[in-house]
Image (cartoon, helix red, strand yellow):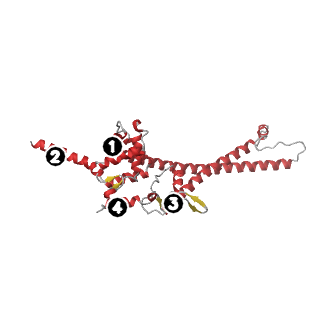
Amino acid sequence: MIDDAVIDAMEVLHSCRCCLRQPPDKDLKKPYTHLGKTEIYSDILEQCFDIRLSLDNDDECGICETCVERLRDARSFKLQVQNSQAELQKRLDRVLHAMDGGPEGGSKMEEQDQPNSVPRSHGQPETEVVQQQEVIGDSVSCISESLIELKTLATCTLSKIETIEKRMALFSSNEQNNADSLCHRLPLKTLPDLEKLELEIQQSEIMKNQLINNLSLVGGNTTTTITRRILQRLFSTALALQCNWTGKNNKFSLKQLLLTEVIINAVRRNKLSENAKDIEITKALTNWFRFAKDRDGGRENRRSFNTRQRRE
């Protein structure tokens, strides 16, 4: 009978990839049309947060409507911040241009004792000069108001950006802590442990890379030896007896797991195997699981022999 923990883990694997609480309503990879615009949610995740999800398995890359709405809000906020920065720069450029007085305004401003004064040409009516002074005064007042408005907008925008950066930093810190603790849980002992690890590396690129780095340190002088040592680091003998490459004989299939990609990448980190082909690595992997029963039997024989030696 399937353990409840296994059932729960399988349900999580088929939940929304962004919250793991609801069944997916849409595919992360497929394009959808919303308000006349095309949306691909995996692309939006990468554009807004630089999060790249593993989307190898079509059955495990969905997103629920709640997370879709939150993702749209995040994208809208990012566009709002970008537009605000562009508008801020545009207004500042306009203010600087107005203060310089255009291409010929600089020299004229230098000739005036007062910023609001207008030189009176010969024969120009005094009322016309006053009118020009009033226009300049209104322009300066308008510029001052615009600067105050821009300062308020910039302060608000920077505050929101700082809040986002703090949240992202906290998220990255938690991701790193989880990645550090992951390696202390090896070797995996049960199928729920394996499914939990698979889910974690699917959701976190940091944890995936941390695992590859850790496994690549095991060493070895051939591709087969390196692969075997990595598998010994990952799987206990008890768990290896429950798994194989294809899932035959009611065993857990490893073929479609992201973990197999992690193993292949870790093998290739070794200089002796950096050019190893996939088929060479998977062959060593398949044989290691195929002979798990023999290794377990050999261990039992050695245990019995040691027990007899102690009794004698």
Q: Which residue is mark 2?
A: 304
- Could you give the CA–CA distance between mark 4 and mark 3, rounded to whole angstroms? 26 Å
Label 3 near label 4: C-beta < 8 Å?
no
Q: Could you say whether the residue bearing mark 1 is in a helix, strand or loop?
A: helix
Lower position in the chain sequence, tag 1 or tag 4: 4
Task: Say which mark, if any, is on residue 68.
Answer: 3
Residue 103, position in %: x, y? 77, 41
Residue 176 seen anywhere in this rendered image of the structure: no
Residue 59 seen anywhere in this rendered image of the structure: yes
Residue 113, position in %: x, y? 77, 39
Type of residue at label 2?
Answer: Ser
Quarter holding the C terminus is top left
- Could you give the CA–CA distance between mark 4 and mark 2, rounded to whole angstroms? 37 Å
Task: Mark 3 vs mark 1: give the one in front.
Answer: 1
Label 2 near label 4: C-beta < 8 Å?
no
Q: Is residue 84 left or right of residue 191?
A: right
- Could you give the CA–CA distance between mark 3 and mark 2, rounded to whole angstroms? 59 Å
Q: Which residue is mark 4?
A: 7
Lower position in the chain sequence, tag 4 or tag 2: 4
Q: Could you say whether the residue bearing mark 3 is in a helix, strand or loop?
A: helix
Residue shown at 33%/59% (left/top)?
6
Residue shown at 25%/48% (left/top)?
294
Task: Mark 4 vs mark 3: give the one in front.
Answer: 4
Q: Which residue is mark 1?
A: 228
- Could you give the CA–CA distance between mark 1 and mark 4, rounded to whole angstroms? 30 Å
Residue sitting nearer the eye, 253 or 28: 253
Type of residue at label 4?
Answer: Ile
Q: Is residue 162 left or right of residue 195?
A: right
